[in-house]
Amino acid sequence: MANLQAFRCTVCGYVHRGEAAPPECPVCGSPRERFEPYTDPTAAEPSFQAAQWVCLSCGFTHKGQSPPDHCPVCGSPDKQFEAVADIKTASIISAAKSRIIVVGAGIAGLAAVESIRNTAPETEITLFTKETALPYYRLNLTRFLAGEILENQLPIHPRDWYTQNRINLVQAAEITDLLLSKKQVKLKNGGRHAYDHLVLTAGAHAFMPPLPGARMAGVTALRTLEDARLILAEAGNARRIVVIGGGILGLEAAGALAKKTEVILLESFHRLMPRQLDQTAADLLQNYLGSIGIQVRTGITIQELVGDERVAGVVLKGGELIAADLVIIAAGVRSNSYLARLAGLRVDGGVVVNDQMQTSDPNVYAAGDIAEHRGVLYGLWNAAQYQGSIAGLNAAGQTIEFGGIPRSNSLKVLGVDLLSIGKFEPQDGSDLVIAGEKDGKYSRFVFRDSHLIGCILFGDTTMGTEIKHAIENRQDFSRLLTQSLTAADIHSAIVR
């Protein structure tokens, strides 16, 4: 078969093979004009048609004729949802029955089993999760801590959904070995399960820095529902809680718990959210946190955690002691790639995958926080959902490619509007930065070759949708950029 042209969706990274770009993206529903030429073509893709709604704040996908009143993940109202296409094949790919095992029941795993079932109704699907709870919205754990939602609102699907869709959900199941040569997975209880294709969506685990005292009672991460239950049980009696880590999770945890008791947040870098914010935005955020009762210390080094059997405080470099009844460590995550490495799959920072989310074993796919695509470990909800869907489709026999997506971050729980998308720092002198602050609101735009490549919005994110589209569509600002502009001028041009 002769090579066909290839076109990449600039919104979600889907790669289409054919004479021209498709009328709309089968993964995210973006129109033809959001595609750009892509190299290394192979085979044409099937077309898709269906409707769904995506939250522009957090990437949550809702299926139905209309958006929900509020996003179940971040709480955004219905006006923050955008109609896009669902991921469904135009026709069933095969009547043959095969066995697909999905390891890990986060959003990547759920997206994988949904896409498998949609495209291959006769396939036998087994979904393993190490947790005892039904698969849940991990992003909602901080909202659960804040009391914005109840625990029974955390599950993504009710139990009978798995039965109705003939998905064998196995809970409290720990996989101890991937027997690739035998195409089996081995469980801790000794049981073995055979597969034709395997999808690894085992996610990541919280990184616990090797601090003296980090294993004491009263020291925890916030990664699982079990962690959240523990924090809630102890927060009511805590006079002071220390949160270590000034990234998104640490900030949201601090915001949730500050409603219950005194909270101090410690960050080793010289500003908050160093991967998402510049200094000006970080300063505005720190001032805001102070106004709602969260004490922030940046640029600090923690020496040790002290106490007898239970933590009693945090000692900083220089000897200062900060008393604490509960310490929450939010120092990032590490990919759960141990089993893959042990089995002989290629692993760098995560399990290395190609554009089809295929690992170094052609029968094994990986997606979500465990997967490293083109050197990138996303660690983002929307990326995990896209990757899981694509991995599931390919495991079921399709040929769909993931070409990468821009990073986008927002905050829940804290009550402040903040959006960071794309690249917020210039890479060299050819990049143009236009920024402005007024009345506690801040905007920062970064341009390269007349295209907007990144933006920070603080205090007002009402134009977030337009910003997202401008970056993803590679909107040309060359005519505008010949003028002397302010951030307000960019606002007006983008929303016009």
Image (spheres, grey):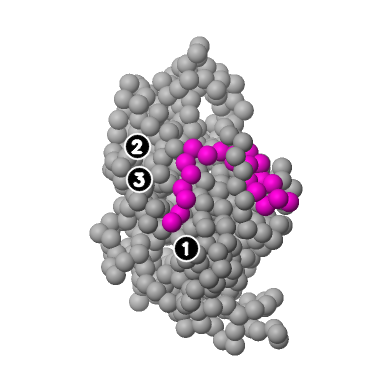
Question: Residue 447 appears in which quarter of the rendering?
Answer: bottom right
Residue sitting at the far front: 96
Magenta stretch, residue numbers = 166-187
The numbered mark at residue 28 is none
Helix, strand or loop under label 3: loop
Label 3: how many residues lie within 10 Å, few (<14), some (14-19) or many (20+)? many
Label 1: how many residues lie within 10 Å, few (<14), some (14-19) or many (20+)? many
- Horizontal side of residue 434 vs 195, given as left or right: left
Q: Foreground residue, 305 or 205?
A: 205
In x, y percent, where is residue 340? 67, 46
Q: CA distance from mark 2 to mark 3?
A: 12 Å
- The answer to whether residue 183 is magenta is yes
Q: Foreground residue, 167 or 361?
A: 167
| Residue beneath disc 3 | 154
Q: Is residue 14 visible from the viewing direction of this image?
A: no
Is label 2 in contact with label 3 (beta carbons under 8 Å)? no
Q: Quadrant of the C terminus?
A: bottom left
What residue lies at 48% left-to-right and 25% top-to-bottom? 219
| Residue beneath disc 1 | 117
Q: Earlier in the sequence, mark 2 or mark 3?
A: 2
Q: Is residue 465 visible from the viewing direction of this image?
A: yes
| Residue beneath disc 2 | 145
Residue sitting at the far left: 69
Name the residue type under label 2.
Answer: Leu
Residue 273 drawn above or below residue 29: above
